[in-house]
Image (tube, grey):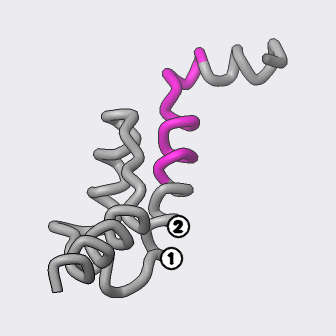
Amino acid sequence: MDPKVEKFLEDNNMTYLYLLLANLEVERLSNLPFTVKKQMKGKITNIALEHIAANDIPDYVMQEFEEQETSEIDE
């Protein structure tokens, strides 16, 4: 990593990087289909912050696809 960038991140306690990643996660969640977003509990910004803090970025689209496949098989 570039020493200037590393020093900046160290000086700012990684807050900048955390917020940058959270902003990208908000954008990703905002672009999900409505059917996926309506199943979320809470505000998208809070969900994004939780995902970044936990270092866990779930793939909601695949979950929705798998649920649809399961329901089609059951029918």
Q: x and y percent of residue 50 in the render?
A: 29, 45
Q: Which residue is mark 2?
A: 27
Residue at position x 33%, y 66% from top?
A: 66
Tags 1 and 2 touching, CB below 8 Å: yes
Residue at position x 34%, y 36% from top?
A: 53
Q: Nearer the viewer, residue 48 or 72?
A: 72
Q: x and y percent of residue 24 in the render?
A: 55, 56
Which image quadrant for residue 71? bottom left
Residue 1 in the image: above or below residue 21: above
Amino acid beneath label 1 = Asn
The verdict on residue 59 being magenta is no
Which image quadrant for residue 17? top right
Q: Which residue is mark 1?
A: 31
Q: Taking 31 as reference, is 55 left or right?
A: left
Which image quadrant for residue 12? top right
Q: Nearer the viewer, residue 2 or 11?
A: 2
Amino acid beneath label 2 = Glu
Q: Quadrant of the C terminus?
A: bottom left
Within 10 Å of disc 2 (Cα), the crowding (few <14, some 14-19, many 20+) is some
Q: Quadrant of the N terminus?
A: top right
Q: In the image, which residues are magenta?
A: 10-22
Residue 11 in the image: above or below residue 51: above
Residue 1 in the image: above or below residue 62: above
